[in-house]
Amino acid sequence: MAFIRSSPQERRAARRRHVLQSARLGFQENGFHATSMDDIIRASGLSAGAVYGYFKGKDELILAAADASMMELREEIAPLLRNPVQSPGDFLKRVKKAIDSVSDRGPIDLRRMAVLGWAEAQCNEALRQRLSSHYGDLLARMTDIVEACQERRIETNADAIETGKLMLSVLFGTFAQASIWADEADTSIFSALEDNI
């Protein structure tokens, strides 16, 4: 077996990912406010100087955690965007299944991180702006799905952008439900979307 030596940049990137993952696990377990930099430093196993060499502080880690979660979400739904769907409701069922799958196999639960992010965004303007940008991109993809579904139907009265917003609201609502109820959130509303859009 050949030994492959990593470059200093690769090692630095790997340690940065490790610190971020330590922070995300702490945020997921205890919330943003209850997770201190000392907690993150301890969980990472690195020195305080090393951790602060990668992130200036908790606010920067919170933004990086949001970016990482949104990147994982995009990676999960990218294959779904390439495959035709029968309806917006069908697409949402597939997205929900993909997100549940990645969240259940862990260690990061994207649903829980979304709910925590929404709460934190109420008092963290930088996070609110970052999430707004990410969700704007997601809304554009949802709108594309609605338009593709509408092209295959003879009649439709639904506005694609407004329907995309509805789809996001329904999807995010299932995340909120899942954060409260231990069992799977009700997805019957997806069928209502299939029947009415």
Image (tube, rainbow, N blue to C red):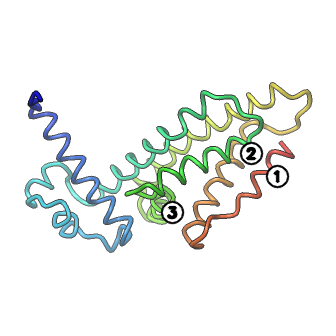
Residue occupied by mark 3: 115
In the image, what residue occupies the spot 67% across and 31% down?
144
Residue 70 falls left or right of residue 40? right
129 vs 140, nearest the viewer:
140
The reply to whether callout 1 and callout 2 are in contact (CB within 8 Å) is yes
Q: Residues within 10 Å of mark 3 (few under 14, many from 20)?
A: some
Q: Secondary structure at mark 1?
A: helix
Name the residue that disc number 1 marks.
Answer: 192
In the picture of the structure, the residue carrying the numbered disc 2 is: 89
Image spot of residue 147 (x, y percent): 74, 30
Residue beneath the point at 66% across and 54% down: 169
Residue type, mark 2 in image: Gly
Cα distance between the residues tagged 1 and 3: 24 Å
1 or 3: mark nearer the eye:
1
N-terminal-most mark, 3 or 2: 2
What kind of residue is marked 1? Ala
User: In the displayed structure, would residue 23 be above or below residue 7?
Assistant: below
Earlier in the chain: of badge 1 and badge 2, it is: 2
Q: Position of residue 191 (x, y in %)?
A: 79, 51
Which kind of residue does numbered mark 3 sit on? Answer: Val
Circle 2 residues within 10 Å: few <14, some 14–19, many ≥20:
many
